[in-house]
Image (cartoon, helix red, strand yellow):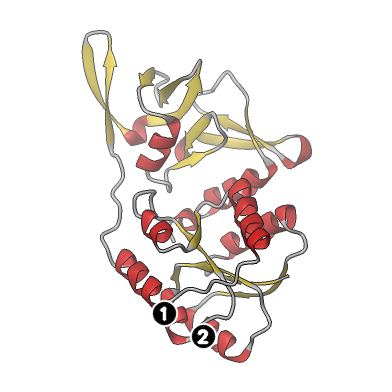
Amino acid sequence: MKAIIIEDEQSAADNLRFLLQSVASDIQILESIETVSDAIAFFKENKAYDLVFMDIHLADGNSFEIVKEVEPIAPIIFTTAYDQYAIQAFKLNSIDYLLKPIREAELKNAIHKFKDKHRKTLVSTQQIEALMSLVNSPKKTFRNSFLVQKKETFIPIASSDFAFFFIQDGIVRGTTNDNQTYSFNEKLEDLENDLNPELFFRANRQYLIQRSAIKSLQTYFNGRLVVNLQPQEKDKIVVSKATASRLKAWLSDAKNVSS
């Protein structure tokens, strides 16, 4: 199977290649393209491909312009950093997508779905117009503060003052930079969606960590990493091999999660 990657962030493209090697080694990446203009030129001249991974925002425009100019002959899986509410537009338009940062399990499911159904459904002009309206809508705002309770007192705390959030005994808790811990009624997935992905990273099922709290990364077994935080966390925070690649890219460049 032959695939095309359209992505203007080199680290994001490299991460997708890495994940594809893990979940679908039979997929051959023919080309990695960074701009709208280069993608249009490529699709006009090339027809031998089976699948396209397409980032929405590129250096010289958004990728929907590509599909309006040249109709690809293969299905497209869009990659996007939009929030879960906005992503409903993709679902309603029956368009495949991967929410950034891309996770190995989600990529595996997308590839399985594509192979299992031998999909030949192409993106229509009507679908692209609907998604164009999504792109032009106001950007999501993120949560800036929390009102936490300590005994009979309610305390406002800025989101940036939390070093990490975690699950303990089925309860979501947050530890601040001054090592104070508070309990929350929300799920960790809800906090992940509410907080700025340039500042917070989902390390694993138990931990959502802030960029400035990460003091070092330590190599671990089988390509995994251990994250060392300040303030220190008593439990070892282990990051999977696939997530380790994304974490290192995220720490290297905040723009990796914003396109």
Binning the other alpha carbons within 10 Å of mark 2 as few (below 14), some (14 to 19) or many (20 upward) gives: many
Q: Picture coordinates of residue 107 (x, y %)?
A: 61, 53
Q: Specify the farthest residue to the left.
A: 153
Q: Which residue is drawn at 27% across and 16% down?
A: 149
What's the residue type where badge 2 is placed?
A: Ile
Check disc 1 and report its element: helix, strand or loop.
helix
> 100 or 182, which is in the foreground?
100
What residue sits 43% from the left and 46% below the top? 197
Q: Dot 1, crowdedness within 10 Å: few (<14), some or many (≥20)? A: some
Tell me which corner region of the image, top left, top right, bottom left or bottom right, holds residue 184: top left
Q: Is residue 75 above or below residue 227?
A: below
* Residue located farthest toward the bottom when viewing the structure as drawn: 45
Q: Specify whether 239 is left or right of 165.
A: right
Which element is circle 2 on?
helix
Name above or below for residue 33 compared with residue 80.
below
Q: What residue type is labelled 1?
A: Glu
Q: Can residue 62 be seen in this view?
A: no
> Which numbered disc, 2 or 1, marks the residue that appears first in the sequence?
2
The answer to whether 151 appears left or right of 181 in the picture is left
Q: Residue furthest top?
A: 151
Residues at marks 2 and 1 touching, judged by CB atoms closer than 8 Å: yes
The residue that label 2 is drawn on is 40
Q: Tell me the residue that label 1 is attached to.
A: 65
Q: In which quarter of the image is the C terminus?
A: bottom left
Quadrant of the image for the N terminus? Answer: bottom right
The mark tally for this picture is 2
Give the alpha-carbon distance from disc 2 to disc 1, as whole Å: 9 Å
Q: In this rendering, does residue 78 appear at all?
A: yes
